[in-house]
Image: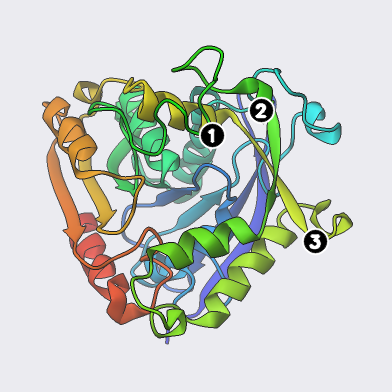
Amino acid sequence: MTDIQRSDFFVETVDGVRIAIREVRSDGVPDRVPMVLMHGTRIPGLSEFDLPVENGSLAADLAAKGHVCYIVDARGFGRSERPPEMDAPPLPGAKSLARSIEITRDVDAAVDHLLASTGQSRAAIFGWGVGGTIAAMYAALWPEKVSHIIGYMMIYGGAGTHAQFGPGSAWDDPENSGHFNKAAWGNYAWNGLELLDVHWDRQIPIRDKSAWRDPAMLEAFRQALIDGDPLAATRDPPQYRSPNGMLEDLFIMGARTEPLFSASQVYCNVMIARGEYDGLCRVEDMEAFMGDMSNAESVVFWNRPDTTHYVLLDRPERGRDDLLRALDAFLRP
């Protein structure tokens, strides 16, 4: 079995923010495209991409295939530098911290370091949720640095109003419908661990959740969320912080159907991965994304039935193995 090596370090962005990176690689000779793994809206990178349980690390799976992987914590998340405002209580009405366009600077710092360390000319970027949107946005901004992007359960915003983010939703401003409810959400949020439990359980269509998801996977995910915030254990029950910039961008794409970028500016190879039971990534939105993507080198749409938003962490036979095979084929030279 291939030995997997891990190392943790920081890179600095062009605007002076310290961003935490975990490198995951095999002890062999990595000979495939290096990869940056970008997390989603409220959850830092290690929670999604490198859990210390069987089948819990996409990064290790990719490394075993010959990819050098950098797992990123965006500014304000996990082990990365947080804005000073996050040391004070959330401020209702304040602007959301760490918008997606700012996070492209974090991705850029990771990509530049990865390319320099591997001697490669281009990287692949895997993004979860709005992290997938950021991956595509980054590819549009710096096409010369990107060979592949994978939008996993991503959102684009080109279709009709999203059912979860329309008028009257928790994110909608009751005084100015169609705008993010800054008064309720403020600049950042404290998140309870129960959000993960409820969201994941709701998508599993059978009563016995353990038959679909290893209970150890849920516990490892929950522990990673606690470990990712030094203040999490100071609250009872534990909670962790996340800036609201990606959440506001998610609302804009969903409720106002406004893409954050034009998919026509994406020139690399593109893979979209969607789970049938995922309420975030919708077929009509991905069809709009693919319809706008007139210049991509290639496009693959993995849309497997009977899968959840968390298929990467579900039991292998529940779609994880199938997705890994499709991903490996997509990334082959």
Q: Nearer the viewer, mark 2 or mark 3?
A: 2
Check if mark 2's residue and mark 3's residue have beta carbons within 8 Å.
no
The local secondary structure at tag 1 comes to loop
Q: Residue at x 35, y 77 (%)?
A: 206
Front-most of residues 49 and 220: 220
The amino acid on which the numbered mark 2 sits, given as a three-letter code, is Ala
Q: Which residue is mark 2?
A: 184
N-terminal-most mark, 1 or 3: 1
* Residue 45 in the image, given as x and y percentages of width and height: 56, 53
- Which quarter of the picture shows residue 312? bottom left
N-terminal-most mark, 1 or 2: 1
The local secondary structure at tag 2 comes to helix
Q: CA distance from mark 2 to mark 3?
A: 22 Å
Q: Residue at x 27, y 41 (%)?
A: 147
* Image position of 148 (left or right of 70): left
Q: Which residue is mark 3?
A: 237
* Residue 8 in the image, given as x and y percentages of width and height: 66, 57
Position of residue 9 relative to residue 237, above or below, is above
Residue 243, disc: none
Residue 170, disc: 1
The amino acid on which the numbered mark 3 sits, given as a three-letter code, is Pro
Count of numbered marks: 3
| One can see residue 59 in this view | no
The amino acid on which the numbered mark 1 sits, given as a three-letter code, is Ala
* Image position of 167 (left or right of 18): left
Position of residue 185 relative to residue 95, above or below, is below
* Residue 265 in the image, given as x and y percentages of width and height: 24, 22
Q: Residue at x 42, y 83 (%)?
A: 208
N-terminal-most mark, 2 or 3: 2
Q: Residues within 10 Å of mark 3 (few under 14, many from 20)?
A: few
